[in-house]
Structures are given as C-alpha cells and as structure tokens.
Amino acid sequence: MVIEYVGQTIRQVMADMREKQYEEQGIGSSYLFRVDQDTIIDATKCGNLARFINHSCNPNCYAKIITVESQKKIVIYSRQPIAVSEEITYDYKFPIEDEKIPCLCGADGCHGTLN
C-alpha cells in the first residue's frame, strides 16, 4: 500500500454540480475519483497527496477499491519496488467517451489518450 485517496464522499449529482462550479471558479483541475456507479471521492479542496499522482500508460502502481467497515475506500498499491526519486503513477482508466483526452505520459506503449 502506498496511500489512500482521501476526499469528500459525494453522489454523482453533486459531482456534476461541483465540476461545473470548479470550472466557473477558474479551478484548473478537479480531483474527482469514481468509486462506483453512485459514489465519487472529491479531493479537489480537501484531499491528500494522492490527488497529485499522475497517470501513466505504463504505471508503477494501481488503484483498488476496498471495503473497510462497510465503507468503500480507494487505495493506491505499488506494482513493483519504487525508488526514492521515482514518480508514482497509475492508469486512470477513464471511461471511453466520444471526446478523447490526449495522454502526455510519454511511457513506452502509451495509448495516446486517457479514455
């Protein structure tokens, strides 16, 4: 285990509203991580360092949803030993959509898009 992705647990309707509010407020990035069909973790304003972990098509970590005392949590686990100065990355696995988000990870075998 590397770190838990921490933030406020919200529903999809609230996540949609917040995403719009963040854009209107000029917040360049929102940190919304889907747990399941109904639940999102919003780490935009009250998250921890996990929100700054970058995407890679060839990551050294992976995200896993676990249940602790009937509460779902997102935990980042390492795939391999990670050196002290090595960047921590995982595959965001964004859903496939018509509008593609370019991937700039530069990893060997980069897919070219995040979704």
Image: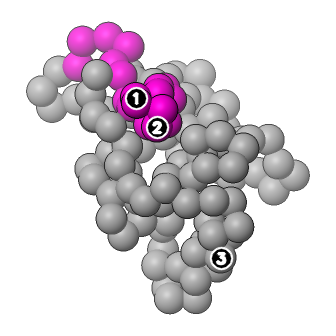
Amino acid at dot 1: Val
Circle 1 residue:
68
Residue closest to the eye, 43 or 100? 43
Q: Secondary structure at mark 1?
A: strand
Q: For marks 1 and 3, give the one nearer the viewer.
A: 1
**Three-letter amino acid code at disc 3?**
Met
Is 19 in the magenta? no
Q: Which mark is residue 17?
A: 3
Q: How are the residues colored?
A: one colour
Q: Secondary structure at mark 2?
A: strand
In the rendering, at what x and y percent does residue 2 appear? 26, 28
Q: Which residue in the rendered view is the most extreme toward the left? A: 84
Amino acid identity at mark 2: Gln
Q: Residue, x 38% and y 13% (percent of image)?
A: 79
* Quadrant of the drawing holding the C terminus: top right
**Residue occupying the point 48% across, 67% down:** 29
Q: Judge depth for marks 3 and 2 and give the one in front.
A: 2
Residue 78 in the image, given as x and y percentages of width and height? 33, 19
- 27 is higher (above) or lower (below) than 56: below
Residue 39 percent across, percent down from the top left: 61, 50
Q: How many C-alpha atoms fall within 10 Å of the one at disc 3: few (<14), some, or many (≥20)? A: few
In this rendering, the answer to whether 44 lies above or below 76 is below
Q: Are marks 2 and 1 in contact (CB under 8 Å)?
A: yes
Is 5 left or right of 92, judged from the image as shown?
Answer: left
Report, in whole angstroms, how far the alpha carbon at label 2 lies from the one at label 1.
Answer: 5 Å
Span highlighted in magenta in the image: 63-82
| Residue 93 x %, y % | 63, 35
